[in-house]
Image (cartoon, rainbow, N blue to C red):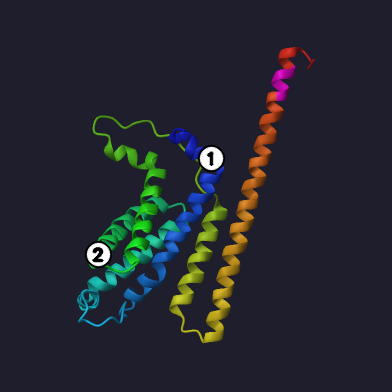
């Protein structure tokens, strides 16, 4: 199966949209924590991990810049329309984070960051047709125009981002936090279910359309249609 067929597969399109959401959401809590100047961890500086993060925290504006970059990358990914640009930022950040977790021997964390790096790489491959001209030294290759995520996905991404960032920004009481968390879960469940059902319905319609086309073509060839 070639690249074009992979791009045209509706399940792959549905999966990539949600992979962007997942990666975007993953950067919101840690990014916001750094942006407002809070410590990312309470591990003692006697430990190499705690010593590293304390030094990063004491770097001042650089620490906050990392948080801003994480939020920006997550937001752009979730907009869908600007997801390629967001993933380029995301890839550079998660590559650095992954190397740090491996170098400092984070227990278990390195596996999570490695999976995040792998997912970001998959998204880069998915958007290969947009990045290909960068690697062309002699001539710009013909770019195949693929269907971009609809306005439905773009609005859904914005809703997700607002829900998660509000959960991080506002100092809700325990009951309110539970309500917001429940609202986020319901929103994710509803949008994922509805979008998947729409995908299945569209796939069925496409299959029915193809069957009708083949049937009509066969009828024409056999002279059954006047």
Instruction: Please give the name of the residue rendered at 67% of the width and 40% of the height, measured from the top-left corner.
Output: 204
Question: In what quadrant of the picture does the C terminus appear?
Answer: top right
Instruction: Please give the name of the residue rendered at 51% of the width and 65% of the height, measured from the top-left corner.
Output: 160
Which of the two residues, 73 or 192, is positioned nearer the viewer here?
192
Ranked by sequence position, the earlier of labels 1 and 2 is 1
Secondary structure at badge 1 equals: loop
Q: Which residue is mark 2?
A: 100
Q: Which residue is mark 1?
A: 9
Is residue 198 placed above or below 65 in the rendered structure? above
Q: Quarter of the image holding residue 54?
A: bottom left
What's drawn in magenta, residue-wise?
A: 215-219
Secondary structure at badge 2 equals: helix
Locate residue 94 relative to residue 155 in the image: left or right: left
Is residue 173 placed above or below 100 in the rendered structure? below
Which of the two residues, 154 or 102, is positioned nearer the viewer here?
102
List x then y, in percent, for residue 212: 71, 29
Instruction: Give neighbour class at mark 1: few <14, some 14-19, many 20+ (Cα, 10 Å).
Output: few
Locate residue 93 relative to residue 142 in the image: left or right: left
List x then y, in percent, for residue 111: 35, 61
Looking at the image, how many numbered discs can be counted on the residues? 2
- Is the magenta region chiefly helix, strand or loop? helix
Examine the structure image and report whether residue 217 is included in the region drawn in magenta: yes
Examine the structure image and report whether residue 66 is included in the region drawn in magenta: no
**Would you say the residues marked 1 and 2 are in contact, meaning their CB atoms lie under 8 Å apart?**
no
């Amino acid at each position: 199966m070639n690249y074009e067929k992979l791009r045209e597969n509706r399940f792959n399109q549905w999966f990539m949209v949600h992979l962007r959401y997942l990666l975007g959401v993953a950067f919101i809590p840690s990014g916001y924590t750094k942006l407002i100047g809070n410590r990312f961890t309470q591990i003692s500086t006697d430990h190499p991990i705690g010593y590293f993060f304390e030094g990063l925290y004491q770097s001042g504006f650089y620490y906050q810049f990392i948080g801003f970059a994480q939020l920006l990358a997550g937001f752009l990914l979730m907009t869908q329309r600007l997801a390629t640009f967001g993933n380029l930022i995301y890839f550079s950040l998660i590559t650095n984070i992954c190397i740090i977790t491996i170098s400092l021997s984070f227990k278990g964390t390195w596996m999570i960051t490695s999976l995040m790096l792998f997912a970001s790489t998959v998204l880069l491959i998915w958007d290969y047709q947009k990045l290909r001209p960068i690697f062309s030294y002699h001539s710009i290759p013909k770019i195949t125009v693929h269907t971009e995520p609809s306005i439905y996905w773009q609005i859904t991404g914005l809703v997700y981002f607002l829900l998660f960032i509000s959960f991080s920004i506002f100092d809700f009481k325990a009951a309110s936090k539970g309500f917001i968390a429940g609202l986020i879960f319901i929103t994710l469940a509803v949008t994922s279910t509805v979008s998947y059902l729409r995908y299945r319905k569209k796939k069925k319609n496409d299959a029915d359309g193809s069957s009708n086309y083949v049937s009509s073509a066969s009828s024409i060839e056999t002279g059954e249609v006047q």
